[in-house]
Image (spheres, grey):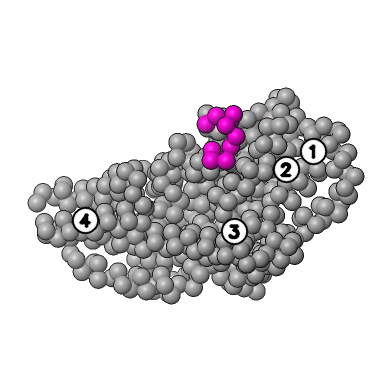
């Protein structure tokens, strides 16, 4: 068998997975099925040692007993419960009454509510759909440019990717922890340091808030330069809102979710609880909040549990499929090929990091963040970390990059979520053109974080003394 055929097998695996996914097959089965097919072909051609697949039971047992991953269903439960308790509706009404006197006030309100929901739920799909149903008709009725309205909703809805507690940060924390330890063992360090989900939560906080600030600056600039595109709420409507006691409504709408955010993130950053324990606190707190708002009953609880089960099953099934894929990929020495490619790039560490970020950005056009996290990060992570890249900085960069994948046409998931609930008069082109400036802002934020790693590493160093 020619050497070039052997070396091409890892690349052919990625190509085959892409084709199978484009054919519409489920992600988890595409990953596992393609890997097993290549393993069978390689075994027949004497190119693949089936002993690699003997490690699969240990991988699956490790997934089942991984305490960090228990946080996934708990955070999903917390997010879905808050969605059902109509927190977003109260926040939007309150913020609109507060910022309504300003041109662009509704856009600012949507962004701030998106930030609060991101810190409360961390679920992009639920946030975009909820905001689309509640705020898009209002923004259009108030005379907002459909492109500005759609772009604002999509972008603010994806903040759950970068602002903790975020599902992607939980998954990245687990994957990067394994990659960091592997990188240190490869370098001969047999007492390896670790990176935790708490480190990523803390590291992502400042970049997430800076990104919100950039969104707000853009909206203020548009409101100033194009006032007709983002008009203020009429004075009569604002007066009616004030008559209802706006201070009491602000306190009632803001304090409960803020208290929940402080309880979850504060317990992690204060060292009082692990992310998994904090997720349990968040799940219970979401139930109490729903009960206080009289939104908790047997029917709603059943819907929340079923939705949580569906999302969690999808995540773990993809993780299992990715484990099979990575084992076969390593059996073909794909990890060595990736290391050779990255270390051979000009620019050393910076060149390799730029190449990986560019590939992830392009993959985000067609793949979900979960597939990229479970398939790509375990392959490139050990190489980059062995080159000296800080694991927290790398994790936040990846999370920010994957957030961008939700906005990039034609397959950005946030675009599909909003298209599904948008009124018929809103064209798909309006949604695509509306998110374009926010994609530029995302790339700008990626550049700022790449130039100043301290945006991600300073706060974990202060909190944990690293």
Dot 2 or dot 4: first in sequence order is 4
Dividing the picture into quadrants, the one containing residue 190 is: bottom left
Residue 192 falls within the magenta-colored stretch:
no
The image shows residue 181 at horizontal and vertical percentages of 41, 67
From this view, report whether residue 454 is shown above or below residue 220.
Answer: below
Residue 80 marker: 3
Please give the name of the residue rendered at 36% of the width and 63% of the height, measured from the top-left corner.
320
Please give the name of the residue rendered at 50% of the width and 41% of the height, measured from the top-left corner.
416
Whether label 1 touches label 2, CB < 8 Å: yes
Can residue 173 be seen in this snapshot?
Answer: no
Dot 1 or dot 3: first in sequence order is 3
Number of the front mark, 4 or 3: 3
The residue tagged with tag 2: helix, strand or loop?
Answer: helix
Whether label 4 touches label 3, CB < 8 Å: no
Residue 109 marker: 2
Whether label 3 touches label 2, CB < 8 Å: no
Dot 3 or dot 2: first in sequence order is 3
From this view, report whether residue 366 is shown above or below residue 201.
Answer: above
Disc 3: CA contacts within 10 A as few (<14), some (14-19) or many (>=20): many
Whether label 2 touches label 4, CB < 8 Å: no
Disc 1: CA contacts within 10 A as few (<14), some (14-19) or many (>=20): many
Q: Quadrant of the C terminus?
A: bottom right
Q: Which residue is mark 1?
A: 100
Residue 422 falls within the magenta-colored stretch:
yes
Bounds of the magenta span?
Answer: 418-428
Residue 67 marker: none
Residue 37 marker: 4
């Amino acid at each position: 068998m020619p050497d070039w055929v052997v070396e091409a097998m890892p690349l052919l695996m990625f190509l085959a997975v892409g084709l199978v996914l484009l054919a519409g097959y489920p992600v988890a089965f595409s990953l596992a099925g393609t890997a097993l097919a290549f393993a069978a072909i390689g075994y027949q051609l004497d190119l693949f040692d089936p002993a690699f697949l003997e490690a699969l039971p240990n991988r699956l047992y490790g997934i089942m007993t991984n305490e960090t991953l228990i946080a996934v269903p708990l955070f999903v439960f917390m997010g879905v419960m808050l969605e059902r308790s109509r927190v977003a509706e109260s926040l939007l009404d309150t913020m609109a009454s507060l910022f309504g006197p300003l041109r662009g006030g509704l856009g600012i309100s949507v962004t701030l509510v998106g930030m609060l929901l991101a810190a409360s739920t961390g679920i992009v799909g639920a946030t975009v759909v909820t905001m689309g149903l509640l705020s898009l008709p209002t923004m259009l009725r108030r005379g907002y440019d459909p492109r500005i309205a759609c772009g604002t909703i999509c972008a603010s809805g994806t903040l759950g990717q970068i602002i903790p507690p975020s599902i992607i940060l939980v998954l990245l924390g687990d994957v990067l922890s394994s990659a960091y330890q592997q990188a240190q063992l490869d370098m001969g360090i047999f007492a390896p340091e670790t990176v935790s989900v708490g480190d990523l939560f803390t590291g992502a906080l400042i970049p997430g808030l800076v990104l919100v600030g950039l969104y707000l600056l853009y909206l203020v600039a548009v409101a100033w330069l194009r006032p007709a595109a983002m008009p203020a709420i009429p004075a009569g409507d604002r007066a009616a809102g004030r008559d209802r006691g706006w201070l009491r409504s602000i306190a009632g709408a803001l304090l409960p979710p803020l208290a929940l955010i402080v309880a979850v993130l504060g317990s992690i950053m204060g060292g009082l609880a692990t992310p998994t324990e904090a997720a349990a606190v968040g799940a219970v707190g979401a139930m109490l909040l729903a009960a206080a708002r009289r939104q908790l009953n047997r029917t709603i609880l059943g819907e929340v549990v079923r939705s949580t089960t569906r999302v969690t099953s999808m995540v773990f099934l993809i993780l299992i499929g990715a484990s099979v894929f990575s084992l076969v990929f390593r059996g073909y020495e794909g990890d060595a090929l990736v290391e050779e490619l990255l270390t051979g790039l000009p620019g050393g560490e910076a060149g390799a990091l730029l190449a990986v970020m560019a590939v992830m950005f392009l993959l985000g056009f067609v793949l979900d963040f979960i597939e990229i996290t479970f398939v790509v990060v375990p392959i490139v992570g050990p190489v980059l970390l062995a080159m000296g890249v800080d694991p927290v900085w790398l994790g936040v960069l990846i999370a920010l990059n994957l957030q961008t994948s939700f906005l990039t046409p034609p397959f950005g998931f946030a675009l599909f979520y909003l298209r599904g609930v948008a009124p018929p008069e809103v064209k798909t082109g309006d949604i695509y053109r509306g998110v374009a400036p926010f994609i530029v802002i995302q790339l700008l934020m990626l550049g700022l974080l790449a130039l100043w790693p301290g945006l991600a590493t300073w706060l974990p160093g202060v909190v944990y003394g690293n």
